[in-house]
Amino acid sequence: MGPTKLASFLAKTFHDNRAEYLKSIPSDVSLVARQLAEKMAEEYRSEIDESAVLSVEEINKSLDFLATGNSMDDQKKRDMMEELIKKCSEDELEWIFNIILKNVETSLGTFSNKLLDWISSNAHTIWQQSHDFNDVLAGKISGKNEKESMKQFENEDQDEDEIGDEHLFKIWTPMLLSKQKRGDWYSNIKKYGGSKFFLQIKFDGENVLLHKKGNKYRWFSRNNNDFSKEYGDCSTEIGKLSSRIHSYFKKDCESAIFNCELMLWDKKTKKLCRHNDASSTSDSNVISFRHIKPDDNQQLTVVLFDILYLNGNPLFGAPLHQRLELLKLATLRKSTEENIFVAEHQLASTKPEIMEYFENAMKNNEEGIVVKRFDSQYFKGQRNISNGWFKLKPSASKDCDLDLALVAIYPRGGRYEKTLYRFAAKENGSDKYRMCIGISYGLSDAIREEIRLSCGQLLREAPAELLDRFGRTPYKIAPENGGYVDFERWQVVKINSNGVRNGKLVDPVMRELRMDKSIEECDTFEDFVDYSSKVLDCKLSDEQFEDLEEIDEKPIIDKRLTRKTMQQSACLPVKSKRMKKESKLSGIEVAVLQGTSEKLRKKCEEILLHFDAKVVKNITPNTKLIIATAPKPTYPKTAQAIKQDQCSIISSKWIERCDSEDELFPWNSDEILHNSVNNIIEM
């Protein structure tokens, strides 16, 4: 159970507001356990008396009961948790929460393979042999006397002591890849990737560190989980992965640490399968790496792509090209794709080579590619661009973008109470739109606030133009959960993802509010359904990144969205590209409101600057005239300005007409969207 689920469970147990528990959850799991223990002890714990003291046995039974089944939505479990909280001290609750959060080792500052040694020096070895805690406490393996047990694992203890360094058989976090920015995916590679680099496929499996010493193995995940029991900690464990790959290593490869990927190999298709992807398996099944049965159509295989330790010698400081050479020559005596093999790598030095390699990887339905500096060293637990390790996924390509209509908002409907935005795509040959996806990640707080203001009052019933994914009328939304956006207020948002898995987009993210596109221009439902084809055909752009001209005039940076910062950013002047011409607008502040086309807005700004007006992007107290670029007065920004009644609001058609003759004309009645008695400018 994670911190969020535990906090939610506690809130439900005591009928509290879930949001209050979740809003202050820290990222440190140990801190979560501490804070929740303090809160529970302060508000709900009973005074300790003789009848309210639980034994260790009772606590263990309670924890076992809480761990049974997959669902925590059970009144009996809530009653059990309430009893624990009322009868345990604050310190006891902290340890109980650490146990539930699987955070005991971190809290103690040690590793799981060392905890048992606190019982006795041989406890860990006995556990490896029998996996029976009674044997651990008895100090011997069942059915054998103490002398026989000691002889059996005497050599094993000696091996453990001989390791004696800070790397082998120790849990530590691997070095991680840096993700590239979309605007210019090549700039960091050019700066930190060196003159030569290696290209590799990014395998879609489970990244692990494989430790080997003789016939002993350890399997540690990137999240510091020990899966040695599941994959086999000794070559003698028949049926486990360690037993299957042991004969593939050279005899002189006595001890080693490999950075590798666990993948699924399909026995029928004779191909590698992507993680949790039913479409890549012969039986369309998704199976857990740690629960594979001998009669399944898939089996685990190991893909080696780096070696970090060999026969007592750490290789972290060695350049990558030397490590890859050692990996190729000094480790495996044979290899097969269905059991264990070394990943292929290609030496490259140019941008086009990366683009071609990426394009081929996408055509082969790979997760992405990896770019690594030729002479890069290995830094444990680091993810820095300066290390020269990069990953490129489909989201780095603009070919994977989709422009969709924002049609509904659920303020706390996403994961971790994030706002969930629902999107729709246009139906071909129809004026209807189909709901297709909900996303809660992406866009800055400022853009989200702008969207909230633009959408106005949310509706309980869907607009007539909107259908659900199956072409039916969408269900009503309870007001407390959110609502639909009025059709007149729909906006286009650019989204993208890292592909499709089991019919769903992988890691979808909102990228940009498209002010330059109207609703009619958004992508079709067929485009959305066929998104996997876009991914297969996507390419990296060869364009050079150019800063937008507005970047020259830097806005005031403030992490908090306040009224002051919004007003200050609205007052930023717009630079002119044309020669200025003196007119009746000289020195007059004119606000150009956003509409459905960013291109039109910029054009209006340029024309007004040409006529020597002082142009701002939003209304300020000094604004004397407003130009609306939206086609209708009901557009959110325009409607809001009409309601304020600060000054007259004129359609962009007027300023375009003036530009065609290079002269200011009086506006016509059909060009007036709002005629205010305040600050009237005569033309």
Image (spheres, grey):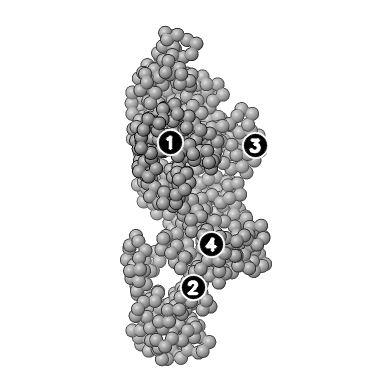
* Label ID, residue 636: 2
Q: Where in the figure is residue 26, as x and y percent of width and height?
A: 37, 46
Q: Where in the figure is residue 576, as x and y percent of width and height?
A: 37, 77
Residue 309 in sight here: no
* Image quadrant in which you'd find residue 374: top left
Q: Where in the figure is residue 310, as x and y percent of width and height?
A: 39, 27
Relative to 61, say whether 408 is above or below.
below
Label 1: state its secondary structure: helix
Viewer-nearest of labels 3 and 4? Answer: 4
* Image quadrant in which you'd find residue 294: top right
Q: Gap in Å between the C-alphas at discs 2 and 1?
A: 53 Å
Q: Gap in Å between the C-alphas at discs 3 and 4?
A: 51 Å
Badge 1: residue crowd in 10 Å (few <14, some 14–19, many ≥20)? many
Locate residue 268 relative to residue 491 in the image: left or right: right
Give the residue type at disc 4: Pro
Q: Which residue is the site of mark 3? A: 269
Q: Gap in Å between the C-alphas at discs 1 and 3?
A: 52 Å
Give the residue type at disc 2: Pro
Q: Which residue is the site of mark 1? A: 84
Sequence-wise, which precedes: disc 3 or disc 2? 3
Tags 4 and 2 touching, CB below 8 Å: no
